[in-house]
Image (tube, rainbow, N blue to C red):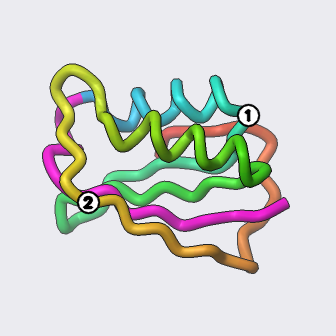
Amino acid sequence: MPSWELIARGRVQGVGYRWHVRKCALENSVTGYVQNQSDGSVLIIATAEEHEFERFCLSIQSGDTRAVVNELQLFRIDYAKSYNDFTIR
């Protein structure tokens, strides 16, 4: 199954954005994890079928009530390990 590394930038820390990403992942059958980074961005490792991943990306770009995503970078990766769920780190 394809995997991606995503970097979200904007107002994405301290506003519940990781919980929003997890909720979107569970709704779209995405596995992997989400983690705050020291530079203020949020790292997302996501594994899903293409159509589920596209829906997931659309839903996390909008953020939630307090988060604002100014930039979402996507990188396809071939080395991700297999995940059984989606976790917050």
Residue receiving disc 2: 71
In the rendered structure, which segment of residues is drawn in magenta? 1-15
Tell me if label 2 and label 1 are in contact, CB under 8 Å. Answer: no
Which percent across, then down, holds residue 23? 52, 25
Q: Which mark is residue 29?
A: 1
Q: Closest to the observer: 69 or 23? A: 69
Q: Is residue 63 above or below residue 7?
A: above
Snapshot quadrant of residue 19: top left
Q: Residue at x 48, y 48 (%)?
A: 34
Which percent across, then down, holds residue 18? 38, 37
Q: Is residue 78 above or below residue 80?
A: below
Q: Label 2 crowding class (10 Å Cα cut-off): few <14, some 14-19, many 20+? A: few
Q: Closest to the observer: 10 or 82? A: 10
- Residue 13 in the magenta stretch? The answer is yes
Prevailing SS of the magenta stretch: strand
What is the three-letter code of the residue carrying label 1? Ser
Label 1, secondary structure: give it. Answer: loop
Q: Residue at x 48, y 68 (%)?
A: 74
Snapshot quadrant of residue 61: top left
Q: Is residue 66 left or right of residue 17?
A: left
Q: Is residue 57 left or right of residue 35?
A: right
Alpha carbon separation for disc pair 2 and 1: 23 Å
Q: Is residue 65 left or right of residue 55?
A: left
What is the three-letter code of the residue carrying label 2? Glu
Q: Residue at x 53, y 29 (%)?
A: 24
Dot 2 or dot 1: first in sequence order is: 1
Q: Is residue 74 above or below residue 44?
A: below
